[in-house]
Amino acid sequence: MIKRISLAITVAALMAGCSSGVKLDDVPVEDKTAVPTTGGSGGANAGQSGVAGVNLGQSARDAAGPVGVSRLVYFDYDSYVIKPEFQSLIEAHARFIKSSGNRKVMVEGHTDERGGREYNLALGQKRAEAVRRSLGLLGVSDNQVEAVSFGKEKPAAHGNSEDVHAQNRRAELSYR
């Protein structure tokens, strides 16, 4: 009888230790369509706030994306909430995708190496879905956007520093 009680206590302690405070079902995207956006063509305007530089290592499949606009959205640790500084980047991609009905984009969600495989796959999916929903709120058709998670399987950088972890907590837009 004592063995069963100690086994039950051990199992309960393990289950409690594996839980996470991150609510993966919360929706991090707000409909802000009534808020005016910053002007600009979404093109090569390097001065636009929140738009990172061009990724010089673009592959041929990404050549169709908007010129001068990064394809990376970075996230805070254990979060899938899109930061305000990436709103103009998402708006530029939404304009580009909407300009042609046959354009398709895959949003790939990634995480850093911390955490279990299943948890990171779920978090990566939530990150990709957050970007997909943001594009949808800006008028992009659901059939033009696909969200997929790679979790921690495809790191952008290797190492164990906070800077490396920050580079891996991302969603990438990949045009097909």
Image: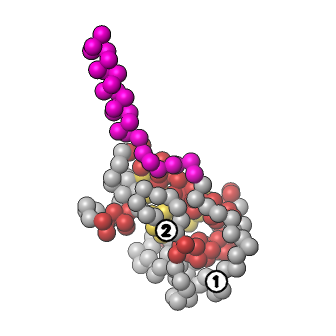
Does any portion of residue 44 appear in the rendered image?
no
Q: Which residues are magenta?
A: 1-26
Rendered location of residue 37, percent (x, y): 67, 80
Q: At 36% across and 45% down in the image, what residue appears?
A: 116
Asked whether residue 115 is drawn in magenta, I would say no
Rendered location of residue 5, percent (x, y): 32, 17
Does any portion of residue 165 appear in the rendered image?
yes
Going by the numbered disc 2, the residue's amino acid type is: Val
Q: Nearer the viewer, residue 39 or 96?
A: 39
Residue annotated with mark 1? 38
Vertical order, 18 against 149 (above or below): above
User: Secondary structure beneath disc 1?
Assistant: loop
- Mark 1 or 2: in front is 1
Extreme residue in the right direction: 34
Rendered location of residue 83, percent (x, y): 52, 69
- Circle 2 residues within 10 Å: few <14, some 14–19, many ≥20: many
**In the visual, does 174 lie left or right of 20?**
right
Q: Nearer the viewer, residue 22 or 57?
A: 22
- Circle 1 residues within 10 Å: few <14, some 14–19, many ≥20: few
User: Secondary structure beneath disc 2?
Assistant: strand
Residue annotated with mark 2? 73
Vertical order, 41 against 160 (above or below): below
Rendered location of residue 25, percent (x, y): 56, 48
